[in-house]
Image (cartoon, helix red, strand yellow):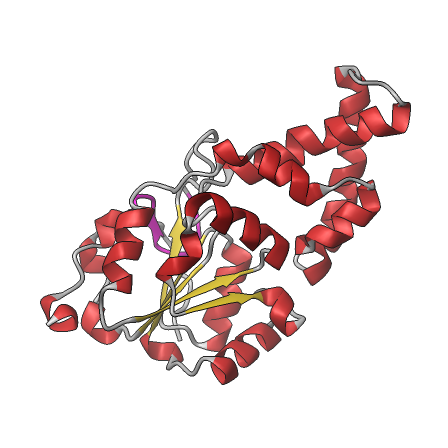
Amino acid sequence: MNSPVSSSPAATPSLLDWDAIDTVLLDMDGTLLDLHYDNHIWNRVLPQRVAARELGISEPTAEQIDSVNRKLLERMASVRGTLEFYNLRHWAELTNLDLVAIHHEFADLIVYRPGAKAFLEATSNSPLTVILATNAHRDGLGVKHTHCGLLGYFDAVVSSHDYGAPKEDQVFWQHLEAAHPFTPARTLFIDDNPEVLASAARYGIGHLLCITQPDSERPPRTAMPYPMVNDLADLLPISRAMTA
C-alpha cells in the first residue's frame, strides 16, 4: 500500500514505473479538466442567482451575494466528503435553480488541464485499462462530455453516485474493483483531492499522484501529502514495454 510521503516533489517520468502499472484511474474535475469552471459556477454564479431569486431582483449587491455565499458554503461544509456534497440534483432542489442549464451556460470555461489530452490519448492507445473514477454526478458528466468529448477516452466511466458512496468511502473502491477488476498494487490513481487519495491509499492503490494546480486561476499548491504533478504530459512517454 502506498503511504503518504513527507515531501511533495514535482512529478517526472521517473516517478512512474509503467511496467508496474496495469490500470489507470483518473479523476475528472481538477485533474483532467480545469477546476476554474466548477469554482466559477459554485462560488460566483450560483450565489448571484440564488440572491437574485430570493430578493426578486436582477442585480443583487456584492454584500447580498456574499451573504448567500456564506450560507451555501456553510451548507457545503456540513456535507463535505459525502455523496450529497457531489449531488447536482440535491443542490438544484436546495436552490430551486436549473443547475444543468447553468452549467451549459458557462461551458466555454470547460477546458482540459495541461497535458491532459496528450495523456488521455497515450493511455487510451496503450494496453493499460483506463477508467474515469469521479465523484461528479452523472448530470455533470453529461455536460462535460457534450462540450469536450471527454468520455470517449475510457474503457469505463464510473461515478460514485453509481455505487451510493463517494471516493472518500472504502465502499466506493470495493464496488469499483468488483465491477471493473483491477489489482490495487498495480494501479495508478491521479486526483486533486488529498482526502480521496488517502482513501485510495487505505484501499491499497499502489501509485498515487496529486495535482499541483487544479484551478488555473488559483496559485499552485506547494505542500501536499502525495507526490505532485501539474502537466500530465510530464508522465509520458509510456514505457516501450507497455506499448510494444
Q: Residue at x 69, y 55 (%)?
A: 87
Asked whether 99 or 4 is in front, the reply is 99
Residue 12, image x, y percentages: 22, 51
Q: Is residue 15 visible?
A: yes
Q: Residue at x 32, y 41 (%)?
A: 114
- Queried whether the magenta region covers residue 227, the answer comes back as yes
The boundaries of the magenta stretch are 223-231
Residue 75, image x, y percentages: 79, 45
Asked which quadrant contains residue 186, the reply is: bottom left
Q: Residue furthest front?
A: 146
Residue 190, image x, y percentages: 40, 58
Q: Is residue 162 above or below residue 209?
A: below
Quarter of the image with the N terminus in it: bottom left
Asked which quadrant contains residue 131, the reply is: bottom left
Quarter of the image with the C terminus in it: bottom left
Q: Residue at x 55, y 58 (%)?
A: 195
Q: Residue furthest right?
A: 55
Left or right: where 238 falls relative to 151: left
Q: How would you classify the magenta stretch by its main secondary structure?
A: loop
Q: Is residue 11 visible?
A: no
Q: Is residue 32 above or below residue 173?
A: above
Residue 222, image x, y percentages: 40, 40
- Queried whether the magenta region covers residue 126, the answer comes back as no
